[in-house]
Image (cartoon, helix red, strand yellow):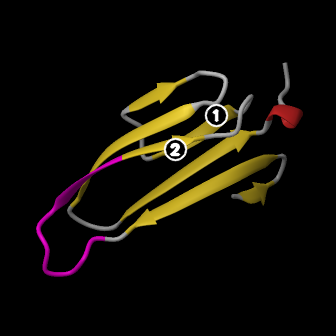
Amino acid sequence: VQAYGLYQRYQLLLQKQLGTRAERANIQITLPAGSRLISVTPSPSDVFLLDAPIVEFRLSLLTDQHIEIIFAPETHQTQ
């Protein structure tokens, strides 16, 4: 997690292994409690807005996949 202005940025790189068939990857990322999503790339399969938001992805690793989530921590939320 990195500072990104007033927000936080989480990045994950999933790398396809050379010479292997496309694999399916199911990923759930849990953000800190009270966080608010700002942007998510690629589009998630699901988002669960609980005390701690959960972002879910169902990806096919035909190529490398890069996930980026920008979120506002609880202390920086605006209303």
**Picture quadrant where residue 22 is located:** bottom left
Of 52 and 19, nearer the camera is 52
Q: Which mark is residue 37?
A: 1
Left or right side of 47 for 26? left
Q: Mark 1 or 2 closer to N-term?
A: 2
State the image coordinates of residue 71 (x, y, percent, origin top left).
69, 41
Q: Main secondary structure of the magenta part?
A: loop
Q: Which mark is residue 29?
A: 2
Q: Which mark is residue 64?
A: none
Circle 1 SS class: strand
Pair 1/2: label in front:
2
Q: Label 1 vs label 2: CA separation?
A: 12 Å
Of 29 and 36, nearer the camera is 29
**Picture quadrant where residue 45 is located:** top left
In the depicted structure, whether residue 71 falls above or below residue 62? above
Residue drawn where x is 26% and y is 67% of the image = 63
State the image coordinates of residue 67 (x, y, percent, origin top left).
47, 54
State the image coordinates of residue 79 (x, y, percent, origin top left).
84, 18
Residue type at numbered disc 1: Leu
* Magenta residue check for 25: yes
Left or right side of 35 for 54? left
Residue found farthest to the top = 79
State the image coordinates of residue 59 (x, y, percent, origin top left).
29, 49
* Magenta residue check for 76: no
Q: Do the residues under discs 1 and 2 have CB atoms within 8 angstroms?
A: no
Left or right side of 27 for 2? right
Residue type at numbered disc 2: Ile
Name the quadrant of the N terminus: bottom right
Residue drawn where x is 71% and y is 32% of the image = 33
Callout 1: few (<14), some (14-19), or many (20+) C-alpha neighbours within 10 Å? Answer: some
Q: Which residues are magenta?
A: 16-26
